Image (tube, rainbow, N blue to C red):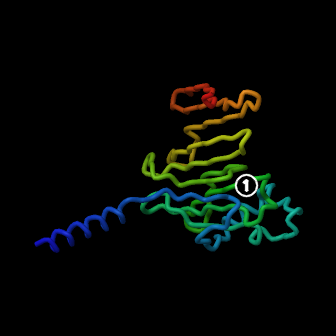
Amino acid sequence: MTSRISLITLCFLLFVSLCTRAEESFVTKEPFRQPAKMPSAVLALLAQEPSVADSTSCGESKPAALLETQVVHLNKTAKAYLVKPAHGCLCREAACPVWLFQMRGAAAKLIWHTPAAIKVAVLDKKFDGYHKLGETAGDASVGSESHWSWDNTRYKQTYKNTWTMDADNKCRLGEETIHLVDGNIVNHSIKCPQE
């Protein structure tokens, strides 16, 4: 009887672990863990991007050699191609541009883009059936964190928290913006270490 209860418990825990989805996160300066072949329609669109087309500093003329792709799942059936530079030459200091494309047959559609991110995440929270996206940018002196939600055609920013460090007072000055349908809520904050 004890072994039967243990087996049922084990099966239940395995089922729960398969059903729960962990957040997928990607550091833009690190290689993708599971790179995928980039669709030619995505490559054609990115070849027109100014940051990719004007890549003389990279020494490589073909966009396919400058970029890498990973497939991400936005919900149970929708997948998309997350694209970022494969080399730091297309990046600004610690942050890189990132694009997210969905395929409609043979056509690619850009559904999200950020010009400079340190980290991008497909969050476990959903809105309108699609996972939200998270983005982090900046360094120790200035930075931001943003969340993006699906609006049936593309991702739109729904939350942004920007901060700067006041080095003299050793305080972090922040501005948090929550985007609503009928306007924005803006909160200002000052966080200082306790003495």
What residue sits 67% from the left and 35% below the top?
Answer: 163
**Residue hosting label 1:** 96
**In the image, is 34 to the left or to the right of 127?**
right
Q: Is residue 181 above or below residue 149?
A: above
What residue sits 85% from the left and 70% below the top?
Answer: 60
What residue sits 60% from the left and 68% below the top?
Answer: 106
The C terminus - image quarter: top right
Dividing the picture into quadrants, the one containing residue 45 is bottom right
Q: Position of residue 133 (x, y in %)?
A: 55, 50
What amino acid is at disc 1?
Answer: Cys
**In the image, is 166 to the left or to the right of 183?**
right
The N terminus - image quarter: bottom left
120 or 69: nearer the viewer: 120
Q: Is residue 101 above or below residue 36?
A: above
Q: Position of residue 27 (x, y in %)?
A: 64, 58
Dividing the picture into quadrants, the one containing residue 188 is top right
Q: Position of residue 82 (x, y in %)?
A: 61, 61
Q: Position of residue 37 (x, y in %)?
A: 63, 74
130 or 92: nearer the viewer: 92
87 or 39: nearer the viewer: 87
Q: Residues within 10 Å of mark 1 (few under 14, many from 20)?
A: many
Q: Is residue 151 above or below residue 44?
A: above
